[in-house]
Amino acid sequence: MRALLVTAPGGPGGFAVTELPDPRPAPDEVVVRVTACGLCGTDMHLLGGELPAARYPLVPGHELTGEIVAVGEAVTARRPGERVAVDPNMPCGACHYCRIGRGNLCADYTAIGVTRAGGFAELVAVPERCCYVLPEDLSEAAAGLVEPLSCAVHGLNRLPRRPGEHYLIYGAGTMGLMMAALVRTAGAASVSVVDLNEERLAFAESFGVDAAVTDAGKLGRTPGFEVVVDATGVVAAIEDGLGRVRRGGTFLQFGVADPARSASFSPYRVYHHEIDIIGSMAVHHSFQPAIDLLAGGLALDPLVSDVYGLDGFGEAVARFRAGTGRKIHLAPQKG
């Protein structure tokens, strides 16, 4: 099979499309023929050698969907021909966090596309338990968005979700706009987004947000917002957002920040205004709800702006880093 292999992270030319042996399923695994796999910020960190858990050489890709083509001898629930989305997260099930039902905080965390071969390949072997059957009429674009949407669903579940509240979201990329779409379903009175990328702001307006600006000060909402969500991980955005939470409001740290950076805020204001600061990490019992939302009509297909074959990976990475377009999918079967 053809696959995208990262061999020398941290430098130019550290990846190549190569031929690898077709995977064979372990007894509890299935083999998936990958039809779409999203390019994510996590993949950029993998290319840069910035994830300590990653094991190289590595086939990345954790936002994957496809068709089951083979099953292991112990597989009972899945069968060849089924179209599935794959939850890449594989908590150990034995640590303290797994035992108290917080598997997304697993102390011995492993993941498809991070610690084992992922979906930037024509075929990938994955545990049966990670596979979620998709509706037959779900579009390929929507199928490839299940994993990131499941992260956004978990983020939404971390929020109080009181109808009639005003939301401010930093970041008009895929994740920020997914959150915007979800909070609309949760009864938000208004949803505004902040981004420095004019192309993304223009798309955000067409996507249905109430306001899309480069500076939250332009929104003129002096009392602040009941809910502020950071979907950027950028310290300047985080600090600005914390200052725009209304008394009694909530700040959600949804974006992945540089672990070496710190943000400044007023502890007195958090105390005096009773501000809740919440984090959201990956996926937590939110994969099936994400599929159900897409099957029920949550229209996210326009978020996918580009689809490349494996040979276009370098161009896809350059486009991602330049901040042009929106969600980029790799289609390993594409010539």
Image (spheres, grey):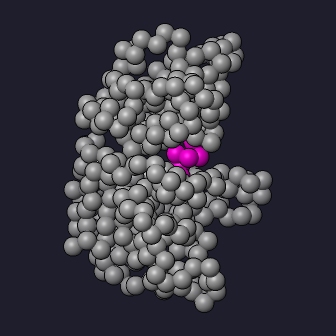
Task: Give the residue at x 66% y 14%.
Answer: 273
Residue 258 seen in this snapshot: no
Task: Give the residue at x 42% y 63%.
Answer: 138
State left or right for residue 256 relative to residue 122. Answer: right
Task: Give the residue at x 46% y 40%.
Answer: 181
Q: Is residue 73 above or below residue 180?
A: below
Quarter of the figure with the N terminus: bottom left
State left or right for residue 75 relative to residue 297. Answer: right
Task: Give the residue at x 37% y 63%.
Answer: 140
Is 272 magenta? The answer is: no
Residue 316 percent location from the top left of the image = 26, 55
Is 152 magenta? The answer is: yes
Q: Is residue 170 above or below residue 294?
A: above
Q: Is residue 100 above or below residue 231?
A: below
State left or right for residue 81 relative to residue 207. Answer: right
Stretch in magenta: 150-155
